[in-house]
Structures are given as C-alpha cells and as structure tokens.
Amino acid sequence: MPYLLIRTNAGVADTAALMQAASRLTAEALGKPERYVMVSVEASRPLLFAGSADPAVYMELKSIGLPAERTADLSAALTGLVHETLGVPPDRVYIEFADAARHLWGWNGSTF
C-alpha cells in the first residue's frame, strides 16, 4: 500500500539498486511489510527548482495510515537516501506526503 515516486533530473546509474534501497527504507520506516511497497523512479526528467536545473529530486510518498508525527523522520531518511545515492543536496529535495483512505486504495481486485 505504500507508494514512493522518486522523480529527478539527475541520471541514475543503478535504478534497480535505488528502488530496492528505497523499498526497504520505506517498509522499515512505516513498519509495513515490504511486499506491499511499490517504488517508481523517473530519472533524467526535466526539472527546475529555485530557478536552477542543477540536480534536484521530487518525491511522493502515499500510504494508508501515514503517521503525521513521523513525516519529519521519513523526510530525513528519504532525503538521506537520494543524497547518498544520487548526490542531490538535501536543500534540493521536495517530498509530498499523503495519507490515503482505505476505500480509495485498490489492490487485488478490491480495496483495503
């Protein structure tokens, strides 16, 4: 049920490794089974931030029951991941968090 989108104007040398690391981090940080985590990476996309085309990242993390009190920790962890793997400075990262209602999240032909 958690979905993480990582969109960046930077190139990604190993997309599979980034997605695997992001999947593990997301599952652990949310305390949810990794088998429900979906990660998508869109690299080398046009992205302008603060008037500059320097490397930047925009992420979306959506999950049922996303704890509002943990978003600061999630922000630090996800920002650290893209800083470490892509070299994008933390001040060039935006993250949008969304708590999805169970009836608005479909899976396996039903909803949660």
Image (cartoon, rainbow, N blue to C red):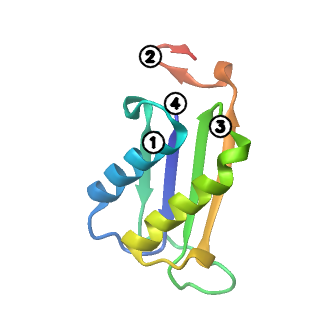
Which x, y percent locates residue 59? Answer: 57, 58
How many angstroms separate mark 3 from mark 2 (CA)?
21 Å
Which residue is at 46% across, 73% downward?
Answer: 83
Q: Which residue is mark 2?
A: 108
Q: Is residue 5 above or below residue 30?
A: below
Which amino acid, by three-letter code, is at mark 2? Asn
Which residue is at 65% across, 37% downward?
Answer: 66
Which amino acid, by three-letter code, is at mark 3? Leu
Give the foreground label among 4 and 3: 3
How many angstroms separate mark 3 from mark 1 (CA)?
13 Å
Label 1 vs 2, first from the N-terminus:
1
Q: Is residue 83 left or right of residue 14?
A: right
How many angstroms separate mark 4 from mark 1 (CA)?
13 Å
Which residue is at 28% across, 70% downward?
Answer: 13
Which x, y percent locates residue 73? Answer: 61, 55
Marks 4 & 3, CB-CB < 8 Å contact:
no
Marks 4 & 1, CB-CB < 8 Å contact:
no
Which amino acid, by three-letter code, is at mark 1? Glu
How many angstroms separate mark 4 from mark 3 (CA)?
10 Å
Q: Quadrant of residue 58?
A: bottom right
| Mark 3: secondary structure | loop
Name the mark on residue 1. 4
| Mark 1: secondary structure | helix
Marks 3 & 2, CB-CB < 8 Å contact:
no
How many angstroms separate mark 1 from mark 2 (CA)?
23 Å
Label 3 vs 2, first from the N-terminus:
3
Mark 4: few/some/many CA within 10 Å (<14, 14-19, 20+): many
Q: Quadrant of residue 99?
A: top right
Name the mark on residue 66. 3
Q: Is residue 50 above or below residue 44?
A: below
Q: Which residue is mark 1?
A: 28
